[in-house]
Image (tube, rainbow, N blue to C red):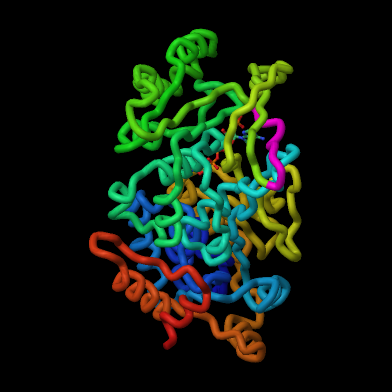
Amino acid sequence: MSLSIVIVGSGPSGFYAADALLRKLPGCRIDIVDRLPTPYGLVRSGVAPDHQSTKAVQRVFERTATRPNVRFLGHVNVGDDVTFGELKECYDAVVVAIGCPIDRKLGIPGEELRGVYGSWSFVGWYNGHPGHRDLDPELTGSAIAVIGNGNVAIDCVRVLAKTPAEMAKSDLCRHAAETIARAPIEMLYLIGRRGPVQIGFTPIELAELGQLEHCVPLLDGEALDRDIAAANPEEVTQKAKPLDILRSFAGNRLGDKPVSLRFIFWAAPTAIIGAGHAQRLRLERTRLADGQAGHTGDHFELSVSTVITAIGYIGAPFDGLPVDEKRGIVRNEEGRVEPGVYVVGWSKRGPSGTIPTNRADAMAVADLIMADFKTGPTGKLGPEAIDRILTARAVRPVGFAEWIRINEAEMKRAADGRPREKFTRISDLLAACRD
Ligand code: NAP
């Protein structure tokens, strides 16, 4: 059967969905729409620039994108260039794979001060996402706090701590590399509102912090042992590897390297203080209460002029889609929003899991679509109708062949040893594929 399917979002969840659909419904026609002229979503603008091996998955996605019945329609903004309703009229099925592109807020006073950044925009900035290119974070003080004990917090800390030489084979964008190299950082605080046994860090990412050329991880070894002794043994067993890595940091000393990375556990931010600009971070010491960070009433402050929050993300409101406000995702039942409309990836389950986690969602959505369209296509207008709508609105999508030109131009302009120097503005991306 020749179903027509549009996937909104060309990140890992979108591409894995396309791949699963092609396996299960080989005759289907798939359009993958993205508001950026570039595909791959978080693989390009989320994965850390020094984690090039993680980005190798692009080659798998490239094979999917170049299948004869697949089109990439880049630089098409759903809600602006074409409405969600129009997509529903034109395609048998719409698969939403737009992720969770908004920083979760701490909800404390001072969050609006200059010098306070969410990791979505900070990571987007150093990765050259056109929407965050001009963030221009102020990294002018000697101490920076990164809040959150997940892998995104580790990415932020590591990118700030690495020397230019350590980043030489990365695709860290030039504007960010220059700002970070100039930053007079001496102290990085990595702050968790719960304890070491509750961390979200994975072992490989945590171990990397022990191998930095100029930065030494510091923590209180006795406090770590007390926390482990007081914790649920099952949880300790589950976290055995990262806890061993943390323990290996306990022998490090302040001054071992020019930059220190201090782990602070059991501390929940309560205010960011400063006159126009962040100057101090106020925290409350916490203790575990029903598994969550509970109050103690005991406060302390850190002098920091930059605060980066890496505390998770929520979904963007999307015209015509029901939102689960509490979880910040599209309201869905096992991936089905309504017959003909589906969600995958972070849009479906929230911001958790690594790139391959999306494979299971992809297979599940393909099964749902097969079940919902047992009797075949539903007589929608077809992708040609979308082409007519876009042409009438003078919207010219960036096709996959054009992306290949951008890709080649980025690789060509990279300095020796670097995989690419990204174009970070829409106008430059379009010029690279069309001039
Ligand atoms: P995460 O792992 O869920 O970590 C979020 C952290 O923010 C948690 O420590 C959480 O603490 C903390 N937090 C939430 N609200 C807070 C608040 N109000 N105050 C203080 N702390 C708060 O999320 P993530 O780091 O954004 O990563 C998202 C997903 O991408 C994860 O699955 C991650 O593993 C994955 N990822 C993987 C890689 C990699 O494999 N290299 C790299 C980046 C991201 P609680 O635990 O107390 O809630």
The image position of residue 302, as x and y in percent, is 60, 29
The image position of residue 173, as x and y in percent, is 41, 60
The image position of residue 204, as x and y in percent, is 36, 35
Q: Residue at x 30, y 34 (%)?
A: 211
The image position of residue 150, as x and y in percent, is 51, 36
Task: Give left or right: position of 271 versus 313.
Answer: right
Q: Residue at x 36, y 26 (%)?
A: 255
Task: Give left or right: position of 431 versus 8.
Answer: left
Which image quarter is the C terminus in? bottom left
Viewer can see residue 156: yes
Q: Is residue 271 magenta?
A: yes
Viewer can see residue 334: no
Q: Nearer the viewer, residue 406 or 74?
A: 406
Q: Residue at x 29, y 54 (%)?
A: 168
| Image vertical order of residue 243 relative to residue 15, above or below | above
User: In the image, which residues are magenta?
Assistant: 268-276
So how many labels did they put on this image?
0
**Residue 23 in which image quadrant:** bottom left
Q: Nearer the viewer, residue 376 or 345?
A: 345
Task: Give left or right: position of 327 versus 198.
Answer: right
Q: Is residue 366 magenta?
A: no
| Image vertical order of residue 317 relative to residue 382, above or below | above
Q: Nearer the viewer, residue 323 or 268?
A: 268
Magenta: predominant secondary structure element? strand
Looking at the rendering, the quadrant in which ligand 1 lies is: top right
